[in-house]
Amino acid sequence: MNTGQAVFAQLMEFIPTYQFQLCVDRYHGNRHVKDFSCWDQFLCLAFAQLTYRTSLRNIETCLRAQQPGLYHMGFRGRVSRATLADANETRDWRIYHDFTQGLIGMARDLYRDEPFGVELSETVYAFDSTTIDLCLSLFPWGQFRRRKSAVKLHTLLDVRGSIPTNVYVTGGQVHDVNLLDELLIEAGAFYLLDRGCVDFAGLYTCTQACAFFVTRAKKNMQFYRRSSRPVERSTGLRSDQTILLTGIRTAQRYPDPLRRIHYFDAEKDSRLTFLSNNFLLTALTIAPLYRARWKVELFFRCIKQHLCIKAFYGTSDRRTR
């Protein structure tokens, strides 16, 4: 370890400051700023996450206790609770959005060849959401139920490396289906979706974009079996069919053929039915491919255990700004 430099400063050396400054200049983040720059704001919030600070006052107290060493940690402006609160309220959030997308691109390059249990060269995404409970009296704009407030993190996760490529923050009442239209579909990629995300209009949009999806079928789905392919029952497969939807609305929303695979999991004694628009992969590849969707659940568990999201640094609704 370099004993002549603070540990926090050594960690911040991994941050590409030139790219950060480009994002700040793009949205004029430092316009009319005399003392507390966007970089100082970023350092404060990074320090808060790394040291598990739970409030703005906590951040101020902890940093001011190290006042002689702040300069060597990279801070140039005076750290105060009021200044940090004002910066969080008024600075353009797109600065950090664009910077985060740049960091995500760098991380994905590092994990581009990481295996995830399925021999597949295409990019694989998992889409799901998690709910973060909030206090209704402090966050009335996020009312979820009668006496409960919450926000949802709708996350599109790159399975290789478990890196989130897109995160949409909404009120707790917004369903995942409503966010399918917000996704920028990548041609040739695979999208792993939960059964609750089954929206045949959205799935057909994915097909028209030359992308593939794997999801689970609902029990009340109406369909017609066009053809079947032979399966080896000893592997757990029970059927591999080509179907057409026959429901009044579903047939209009998804008029093309679908692949329906019935699989029996002997370890968990459960039967799973998968839907996909890919007819080239083997049926035994579809089942473990869908199993990789659980990486997004592990990602949610990780951020809830290691990030300070149980106590927010502000209570206002920034979605309207």
Image (spheres, grey):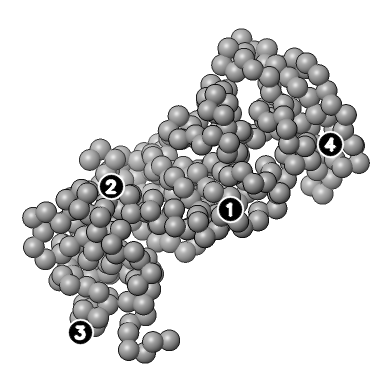
Residue type marked 2:
Arg
Question: Residue 237 bears which disc, if any?
Answer: 4
Q: Is residue 72 above or below residue 320?
A: below
Residue type marked 1:
Arg
Label 1: which residue? 160
What residue sits 75% from the left and 22% below the top?
242
Q: Nearer the viewer, residue 213 or 271?
A: 213
Q: CA distance from mark 3 to mark 4?
A: 66 Å
Q: What number of labels is visible? A: 4
SS for dot 3: helix
Q: CA distance from mark 1 to mark 3?
A: 43 Å
Question: Residue 68 bears which disc, if any?
Answer: 3
SS for dot 2: helix
Would residue 221 be seen by someone viewing this image from the given angle?
Answer: yes
Q: Are marks 2 and 4 in contact (CB under 8 Å)?
A: no
Which badge, 1 or 2, comes first in the chain's sequence? 2
